[in-house]
Amino acid sequence: MTRNKRPLPRLPKDWLEEIVEARAHAAGTKPFGEILGTPISNADLFHLAPLVCLTFRGRDLRGPDAKRITETALANYVANSDPEGIDHGLERKPILAFAVCYVAAHLALELLDEQEAEAVLSYCEEHLSEDQV
């Protein structure tokens, strides 16, 4: 099913604005965690980045594509959190963790190529602050 979708950001600064908005959208789930007895912290929100990506792009939240995109995004989190390899300190930077997963989900959807994704994440790393959201 296709829903209303947002236009794809073009410039890294536009991506940053959408990532901040997407993370705020994900943060809207916090009350449900409390109701269910499983609090959702800011550090947990990166798990929701692929679903927000699918929502913002008007894509189906279920099915094999959604599963693949979620797995790809979360694998990128793990790959960028390896203390023996690449470690961007994502555990200490929840907004950047969300950005990594959000951009990786778009990469998996083939809405960004690797060069564009790298440019967006570099811009985010330079301009995101943990008090933004």
Image (cartoon, helix red, strand yellow):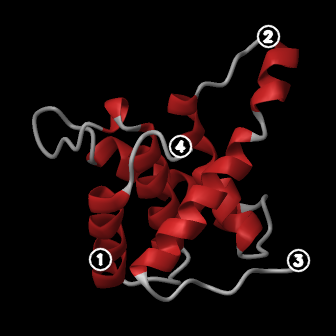
Work out whether residue 65 or residue 131 is closer to the camera in this orientation and state it: 131
Residue 89 appears anywhere in the view: yes
23 sits to left or right of 127: right
Residue tagged by mark 3? 3
Sequence-earlier tag: 2 or 4 = 2
Which is in the foreground here, disc 1 or disc 2? 1
Q: Badges 2 and 4: C-beta atoms under 8 Å apart?
A: no
Q: Badges 3 and 2: C-beta atoms under 8 Å apart?
A: no
Residue tagged by mark 4? 46
Q: Quadrant of residue 124?
A: bottom left
Sequence-earlier tag: 3 or 2 = 3
Residue tagged by mark 2? 37
> Type of residue at label 3?
Arg
Coordinates of residue 108 in the picture (x, y in percent): 49, 71
Disc 3 and disc 1: Cα gap in Å?
28 Å
Q: State the SS at label 4.
A: helix
Residue 50 appears anywhere in the view: no
Quadrant of the image containing the C terminus: top right
Coordinates of residue 100 in the picture (x, y in percent): 41, 56
Disc 1 and disc 4: Cα gap in Å?
20 Å
Disc 3 and disc 2: Cα gap in Å?
31 Å
> Type of residue at label 2?
Gly
> Type of residue at label 1?
Ala
Q: State the SS at label 1.
A: helix
Which is in the foreground here, disc 3 or disc 1? 1
